[in-house]
């Protein structure tokens, strides 16, 4: 079939909206009509050539929601007409990682996903006879895409696509980092570095968990008002203080119980670790750093009981947890609508990247 897609032909070039060819689903795969997709900073990072796994030409996008239109042989867990959210972290329920009960990082198809192809090693997308790579196993910047059955979460049909697509990455990553990875407890002090599409969801996760001080840190002063809408109790702009770590340690009487990096900046990651409380504070890395960057700190920071951890997709097991997060949204336990600041057509998708880079948007969503 033919489908409209925004193709990343080269790094650092705007996406081009073209009609691509899409092969139908093979055994164990499903064809999904994407109804809406968010634009996450990770898409921008890959488009900017900063991803060590980035390959071109590819169809980016990993934060979508849509409808199953066709199923391949042997597919049993979803049916035509089901509403689904594509999962860049699938859940096969059979691999060592899924069976461990210790991680959400299913390994069933990770190797081929990172190479931009389906589990059988081939791509379903092509343009003028040339193969186009998939991205993060999702490629939601295409109106239709093909996904392995283990990489879709079936969701309730009354959830609007325009907002629930954000659960495909940003919402689950931020809220999940608090409730699944950190397991923040009532009264814990929390610091969130970077109040964008992910950081605001960490704030609302901290509010949900009953955290005590919920401190937001951002170099964009406009983010103070945004943070306060989602539970932030204190705001610090690093540009206004001489030593951000010393300032935060004093503010929290010795450091936070939990800190979260939502910037992808390795200098900030160090600050987040060092703003943790001596003896027990834990810093969670969410931000994705550009290829070649490394984190560092004095080992003494760890010797004296600070912990450094990371999280992908908020530690959520996609097929199991995503439908529950959709319920949380639909029942009013978490908010999404105010964070969708811009709704665009596919033709306007490059504007979404500009709005992110200029700090004007929280989340731009493309509606097909
Ligand atoms: P965003 O652009 O919406 O937000 C980033 C925020 O960080 C902005 O508000 C910006 O002003 C702020 N910021 C930038 N530099 C800063 C600094 N030095 N100090 C303080 N604040 C600073 O991006 P996003 O979509 O929220 O994504 C955030 C990061 O999370 C990205 O690196 C993205 O790739 C990553 N991410 C990771 C996962 C995961 O599963 N681990 C999932 C989604 C996104
Ligand atoms: N490809 C990069 C790493 C990118 C990365 O860490 N991705 C996160 C999700 S970001 C979503 O916006 C993730 O899920 N990581 C776990 C995984 O298996 O990719 C690189 O550095 O090579
Ligand atoms: Zn993302």
Image: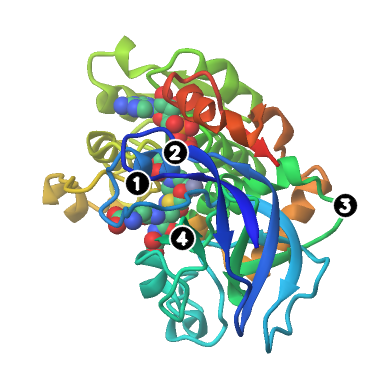
Residue holding disc 2: 41
Q: Quadrant of residue 250?
A: top left
Q: Secondary structure at mark 2?
A: helix
Q: Is residue 21 left or right of residue 267?
A: right
Q: Is residue 73 left or right of residue 253?
A: right
Q: Quadrant of ligand 2?
A: bottom left
The CA distance from mark 4 to mark 1 is: 20 Å
Q: Position of residue 366 (x, y in %)?
A: 64, 37
The CA distance from mark 2 to mark 1 is: 9 Å
From the Cβ of disc 1, is ligand 1 less than 8 Å away? yes
Closer to the N terminus: mark 3 or mark 4? 4
Residue holding disc 3: 158
**Residue under the image location 31 percent in, 22 percent down:** 247
Judged by depth in the image, the label closer to the viewer, 3 or 4, is 4
Closer to the N terminus: mark 4 or mark 1? 4
Q: Quadrant of residue 221?
A: top left
Number of marks in the rendered image: 4
The CA distance from mark 2 to mark 3 is: 28 Å
The disc at residue 288 is: 1
Please say whether residue 261 is visible from this viewpoint. Answer: no
Q: Quadrant of the C terminus?
A: top right
Q: Nearer the viewer, residue 328 or 255?
A: 328
The CA distance from mark 1 to mark 3 is: 33 Å
Q: Is residue 51 left or right of residue 108?
A: left
From the Cβ of disc 2, is ligand 1 less than 8 Å away? yes
The disc at residue 134 is: 4
The CA distance from mark 4 to mark 2 is: 18 Å
Q: Position of residue 227 (x, y in %)?
A: 56, 25
């Amino acid at each position: 079939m033919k489908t409209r897609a925004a193709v990343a032909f080269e790094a650092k070039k705007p996406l081009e909206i073209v009609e691509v060819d899409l092969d139908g689903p093979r055994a164990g795969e499903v064809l999904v009509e994407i109804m809406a997709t968010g634009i996450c900073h990770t898409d921008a990072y890959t488009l900017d050539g900063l991803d060590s796994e980035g390959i071109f030409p590819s169809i980016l996008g990993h934060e979508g929601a849509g409808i199953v239109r066709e199923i391949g042989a042997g597919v049993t867990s979803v049916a035509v007409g089901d509403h689904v959210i594509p999962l860049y972290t699938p859940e096969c329920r059979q691999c060592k990682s899924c069976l461990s009960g210790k991680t959400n990082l299913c390994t069933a198809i990770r190797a081929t996903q990172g190479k931009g192809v389906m589990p059988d090693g081939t791509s379903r997308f092509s343009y003028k006879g040339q193969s186009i790579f998939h991205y993060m196993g999702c490629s939601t910047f295409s109106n239709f895409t093909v996904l392995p059955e283990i990489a879709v979460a079936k969701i309730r049909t009354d959830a609007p696509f325009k907002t629930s697509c954000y659960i495909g990455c940003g919402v689950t990553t931020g809220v999940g980092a608090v409730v699944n990875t950190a397991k923040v407890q009532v009264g814990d002090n929390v610091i969130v570095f970077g109040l964008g599409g992910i950081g605001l969801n960490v704030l609302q996760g901290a509010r949900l968990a009953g955290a005590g001080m919920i401190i937001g840190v951002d170099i964009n002063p406009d983010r103070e008002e945004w943070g306060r809408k989602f539970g932030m109790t204190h705001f610090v702009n690093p540009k206004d203080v001489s030593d951000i770590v010393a300032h935060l340690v004093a503010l929290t009487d010795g450091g936070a119980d939990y800190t979260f990096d939502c910037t992808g900046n390795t200098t900030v990651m160090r600050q987040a670790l060092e703003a943790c409380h001596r003896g027990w504070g834990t810093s969670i890395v969410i931000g994705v750093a550009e290829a070649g960057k490394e984190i560092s700190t004095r080992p003494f920071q760890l010797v004296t009981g600070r912990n450094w951890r990371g999280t992908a997709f908020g530690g959520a097991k996609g097929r199991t947890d995503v439908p529950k997060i959709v319920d949380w949204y639909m029942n009013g336990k978490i908010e999404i609508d105010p964070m969708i600041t811009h709704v665009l057509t596919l033709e306007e998708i490059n504007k979404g990247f500009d709005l992110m880079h200029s700090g004007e948007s929280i989340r731009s969503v493309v509606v097909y």
